[in-house]
Amino acid sequence: MVTSRSVAALPQVEDRIAEAARRAGREPSEVRLVAVTKGHPLDVVEDAIAAGIQDLAENRVEALLHRVERYADASVRWHMVGHLQRRKAPQVRGQVHLLHSLDSLKLARRLERTAGEDEPLLSVLAQVNTSGEESKGGFEPEALVESVGEILECTSLRLHGLMTMAPLTDDEALLRATFGRLRALRDQLDRELPDYDGPELSMGMSNDYEIAIEEGSTMVRLGTALFGERNG
Ligand SMILES: *Cc1c(COP(=O)(O)O)cnc(C)c1O
């Protein structure tokens, strides 16, 4: 297959994902590549789809909904990875394959309250602030069991696992600790909450995805590594 210039890095990225998985004794198929197209024009989206990428992501509701509609005929799944303002929350229902950024109980309750009766469940990941940085959103690890217990009571949501964002650093030990913590939290939820059924770990971006995979990531969210620098 001829790969367009905007996705020329795809084969190499796929190799690196597979190698990182094998280093950790995992199957490459256990890691899903989610291509983050935010800040890139539509021809990049089209090149990605033509290259066979099936999972695409945006971090703003407006761009997301626009692209969901525009590529409704393509068999791709759209993910929402950015902070979702509460007043815009209802708009993603029925539109996204997975909301990675459920980051507060207020947002969960808002999604629950605005769900129509016959609407399909909204698939979500709970975003956790495992790095402790103030700039990062998400649930606090210390209260996660309790918070997830409340999310599980929202019958219009289907919780598939956890998501985190690591600090922007080359400090490998710090990155491993951040990702390892998310994995440990998932395992704790598994042990302590009988209703918890959320194996997914969305972790790893262009700067750190190989380490994230070695630490158990099941979904890496890649923009720059695939498409180069963004304009927007
Ligand atoms: C932009 C973004 C990404 C992709 O970032 P890159 O460093 O370009 O790979 C991943 N996750 C979230 C939440 C983002 O906002």
Image (cartoon, grey):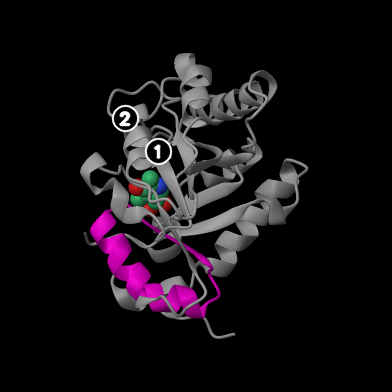
- What segment is highlighted magenta in the picture? 44-69
Residue at 35% x, 41% y: name it: 111
Q: Residue 172's x, y, as percent? A: 52, 31
Residue 229 sits in quarter: bottom left
Relative depth, front residue between 26 and 201: 201
Q: Is residue 61 visible?
A: yes
Discs 2/1, front:
2
Residue that mark 2 sits on: 106
**Magenta: predominant secondary structure element?**
helix
Q: Name the residue at the top extreme.
A: 142
Residue at 39% x, 41% y: name it: 101
Residue at 61% x, 55% y: name it: 16
At label 2, the amino acid type is Lys
Q: Residue 78's x, y, as percent? A: 44, 62
Q: CA distance from mark 2 to mark 1?
A: 10 Å
Q: Residue 93's x, y, as percent? A: 38, 54
